[in-house]
Amino acid sequence: MMIERIGILIVALIAAPTGWAMAEGWLVCAAVGWALIGSTIALGSILIRRSGRPRPVPLVLVP
């Protein structure tokens, strides 16, 4: 649950400042990349929870 919230927070912190840039047409790839990272963190936490491990393992993601 905490990793999902952290992922959403990361995406929100990155997407908010780059929103104006997306309107200009640049940094679109960066915004999509950060959204994919956030969804990967959420998906990873779900898979870890279903695997039966007691605590989620922190995921290290390199864009």
Image (tube, grey):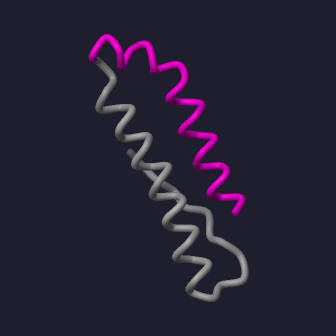
Residue at image point 61% right, 63% down: 58
Rendered-image quadrant of the N terminus = bottom right
- Report the side of 50 relative to 36 (left or right): right
**Residue extending furthest toward the bottom:** 52
- Report the side of 55 relative to 40 (left or right): right
Residue at image point 36% right, 32% down: 30
Whether residue 17 appears in magenta in the rendering, the answer is yes
- Report the side of 11 relative to 40 (left or right): right
Q: Quadrant of residue 55?
A: bottom right
> Where residue 62 sits in the image (x, y, percent)?
42, 49
Q: Does residue 27 sit above or below 58 in this rendering? A: above
Residue at image point 58% right, 68% down: 45
Q: What's the magenta region?
A: 1-25
Q: Does residue 59 sit above or below 49 in this rendering? A: above
Q: Does residue 26 sit above or below 57 in this rendering? A: above
Q: Quadrant of residue 33?
A: top left
What is the tally of numbered marks visible in this picture? 0
Residue at image point 53% right, 30% down: 14
Q: Of 12 and 55, which appears nearest the observer?
A: 12
**Residue extending furthest toward the front:** 23
Whether residue 13 appears in magenta in the rendering, the answer is yes
> Where residue 60 sits in the image (x, y, percent)?
52, 57
The dominant secondary structure in magenta is helix
Rendered-image quadrant of the C terminus = top left
- Report the side of 3 relative to 47 (left or right): right
> Where residue 15 sits in the image (x, y, percent)?
50, 29
